[in-house]
Image: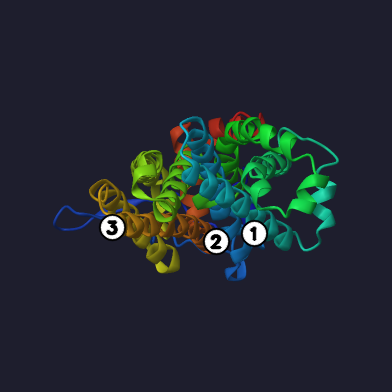
Amino acid sequence: MASDDEAGLLATPGPQQRPRRRGRGGREHLMVPEAEFQSYYGKPIVKAPPWEYDIAAYLFLGGLAGGSSLLAAGADLVDLPNQRRSARIVALGGITGSLYYLVRDLGRPERFHHMLRVLKLTSPMSVGTWILSTYGPFAGLALGQEVVPLLPARLARRLPTDLITRASRPAGIVAALVAPAVAAYTAVLLTDTAVPSWSAARRELPFVFVGSAAAASGGVGLLLNPLHETGPARRLAVGGAALELAADQVMQRSMGITAEPLHEGRAGAYHRAAQILTAAGAVGAVLGRRHRAVSAVAGIALAAGSACTRWAVFHAGMASTEDPKYVVIPQRERRDARGGGEDYADQVREGRVR
């Protein structure tokens, strides 16, 4: 943890040391102006990650895939063939798209392969790479049961179609067991950085992402399936939306000043849209139990709300790196909470605080 001088801030006296004097009315007046959060040459204290829209898409599609695998496994066990088939297709499509955007962001495809050379448990990126590499093949094998009947007879005779069909259910269950990690690890990936708005949300953001993933996958299930098979998707969507909205409120309160970027600019627009779409989608999912069109529209709203949530979190983090106050004020709050001054410096030197 760097001090203010180390962080590149202009030196300003702390509020406890500022001398005050009384005016005629007994009011106290500051003898020095309030501190202005400036950095040398206007440069940000924290460098923003070199990430573009690829990462936001990667976050959304990974969550959609994870939630869909859970839905597909449940539909398979209770014999809902349409729901199972659509969820398996969405899961494989989602994880394929997520991997595409991740590799695109890496710049060279071989970098993904290089990350598989080691497993570093203290690195969210390393663990995430292994989670995706474990989940993807099982999600693909789970779809085999749906693909085999569509194969030309000549090709089907040359493939172990019986084995593929029998392996689809176990593979789908394994994919469903890994799915929560697929949906949540991207939140850990973001919050393990020095980006103020992401780091401050480290306790609640995994719950927001898991709820968002459930809402999106349930919403797509409502959109693609007949009413009599949408029961599990409807419950998953409504439960996910409730979790996302509740966790988001708790997260904003715990983030303190670093929650401001969630309400401003591009991030604020996405965040407001996410709140409205998710709430409206959940209500529509409940009211559309007997109406196909209402159910489908609710599903679209839930999926769009989930995408807006990921975009809002992504842009809020990027915006928080541009203003020094999102770095300095939380640092001072943590310092004051731990006794301030020399005591805090000792804790930093001894590695007892982040």
- In this view, the residue farthest toward the bottom is 41
SS category of the residue bearing label 1: loop
Q: Quadrant of residue 98?
A: bottom right
Whether the residues at callouts 2 and 3 have beta carbons within 8 Å, the answer is no
Residue shown at 67% from the left, 32% from the top:
166
Reply above or below: 187 against 266.
Answer: above
User: What residue is disc 2 on?
Assistant: 318
User: What residue is disc 3 on?
Assistant: 294
Disc 3 packing (10 Å; few <14; some 14–19; many ≥20): some
Q: Quadrant of residue 162?
A: top right
Q: Nearer the viewer, mark 2 or mark 3?
A: 3
- In this view, the residue farthest toward the left is 25
Distance from the alpha carbon under mark 2 to that under mark 1? 8 Å
Q: Which label number is shown at residue 49? A: 1
- The amino acid sitting under disc 1 is Pro
Asked whether 205 or 31 is in front, the reply is 205
Q: Which label number is shown at residue 321? A: none
294 vs 76, left or right, is: left
- The amino acid sitting under disc 3 is Val
- The amino acid sitting under disc 2 is Met
Residue 162: in sight, yes or no?
A: yes
Asked whether 241 or 330 is in front, the reply is 241
Reply above or below: 337 against 316.
Answer: above
Q: How is the image coloured?
A: rainbow
Disc 1 packing (10 Å; few <14; some 14–19; many ≥20): few
x then y, percent, for residue 35: 43, 59
Whether the residues at callouts 3 and 1 have beta carbons within 8 Å, the answer is no
Comes first in the chain, label 3 or label 1? 1
